[in-house]
Structures are given as C-alpha cells and as structure tokens.
Image (cartoon, rainbow, N blue to C red):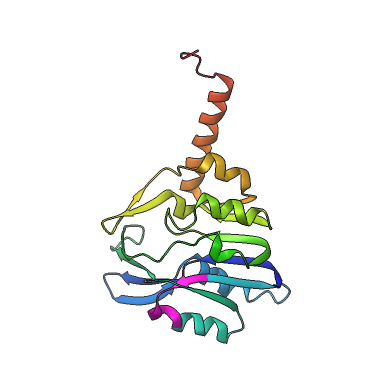
Amino acid sequence: MKKHQLCCIGHITLDKVVTPQSTVYMPGGTAFYCSHAIRHFNDIDYALVTAVGATEMKVVDQLRGIGISVTALPSQHSVYFENIYGENPDDRTQRVLAKADPFTASQLQEIEAEIYHLGSLLADDFSLEVIKELSRKGLIAVDSQGYLREVRDTHVYPVDWIDKREALQYIHFLKVNEHEMVYFAQYKTAAFKNSAHPDTSSS
C-alpha cells in the first residue's frame, strides 16, 4: 500500500445554507475544503478518506476529476447540516438533519500516511481507538471542533471532550479557533492546578 505524505480523513457534508436573501445547497466539511486547498500544492502527496451516502458520491467523483485521490467508504447517510443565518452573519442557528457513519480503526487499516489529519465534525466521528491505531503509523493532526459538539434531536450542543486527557497524548497537531483555544486553556490550567495541589481528602 502506498504511503502518502498527508491523508485527510473526514466526512464530506451536504450543507443547507439559509440567509434572508436565499437558500443554497452545497458540499462542505473539513475534508472537502482541505482537499481543495491542498490540491494547489503540487509537491504534496495527498489522499482523502471520506464516508458519504449515495447522494454525495457525485462530489467524490468531482474531486477525483480534479486529480484528488479519494477513498469513499460506504455510509447509510451523509452528514447534512442546516445553517440558518440572520441579518447579522454571526447570528447562526445550526441543526444536523442526518449523520454519517463514524470511522472505525478496521476501515483505516490499509491507509498509510506520514500525517493523518482527522477532520472531525461531530463528537462520535472518531473514537479514541482510531486515534491510537493511526498514531502507530504516522503523526496525528486533529480539528478539535467536532469533539466539542454533539447532536441531540437534530440540535447541536457544546460538550466536553470526554477522552481528551488520553487522546491528546497521541495528537501532534491540534487545530483550534479562538473559542476552542479558551476551552483548552481552561483544561490545561485545571490540570496544572490538580497536579500541583492533588486532592488528598480521600487518603
């Protein structure tokens, strides 16, 4: 099996974008945008692994048509985001109308890369087992956004990353925005305080 320099693993989404002016349907997701960006670097051996329903296979074919190596895993559905914006573009209501199947370690056994970028969108996209298994073969980069949100009855809620303490031991590159950075800074501060002042009440 060929070993790529960089492999992005993530779901290509169907995005419904509603604004006061229009409603537009378009592909999206970290995997989609990462692939379009990386293809402009001719000196990087890149591959994409995604999982989509039959309705989004046309997007996979389009990516292959512009020279991107794509492995498309079967999924009952594609991730389907609905984003509704008000007059202020920062005012967004988000729902998830369908979820794709999570990625599993067994599905990725034959994927070889120097760096794996996990484009997580929702909390259950990648298990801790997947991170551990891939870290045995290459460096791990993670987009943290998906680990910090989950879907309950189509609505998206912020959540704690339950396995972060163990998962971060295997992650070499962590991508965060300004809000996610605050979350991890608070976690690091709390971890430092706990290590400096351990709870001895039960001893």
Quadrant assignment, res 107? bottom right
User: Is 5 on the left or on the right of 143, as rendered?
Assistant: right
Residue 3, horizontal then vertical, whole percent? 71, 69
**Which residue reaches farthest front?**
106
| Magenta-span inclusion, residue 134 | no
Instruction: Name which residue lies at 47% across and 70% down.
Output: 51
User: Is 91 on the left or on the right of 146, as rendered?
Assistant: left
- Comparing 64 with 127, the one in front is 127
Instruction: Name which residue lies at 55% across and 59% down.
Output: 105
User: Is 169 on the left or on the right of 53, as rendered?
Assistant: right
The vertical placement of 123 against 79, above or below, is: above
User: Is 162 on the left or on the right of 98, as rendered?
Assistant: right
- Comparing 188 with 138, the one in front is 138
Tell me the quadrant of the picture where the N terminus can be found: bottom right
Residue 32, horizontal then vertical, whole percent? 51, 71
The vertical placement of 1 against 118, above or below, is: below
Quadrant assignment, res 66? bottom right
Quadrant assignment, res 138? bottom right
**Which residue reaches farthest right?**
43
The vertical placement of 186 against 68, above or below, is: above
Residue 6, horizontal then vertical, whole percent? 66, 66
Q: How many marks?
A: 0
| Stretch in magenta | 50-57
Instruction: Name which residue lies at 49% across and 56% down.
Output: 126
- Comparing 29 with 1, the one in front is 1
**Which residue reaches farthest bottom?**
65
Residue 34, horizontal then vertical, whole percent? 56, 68
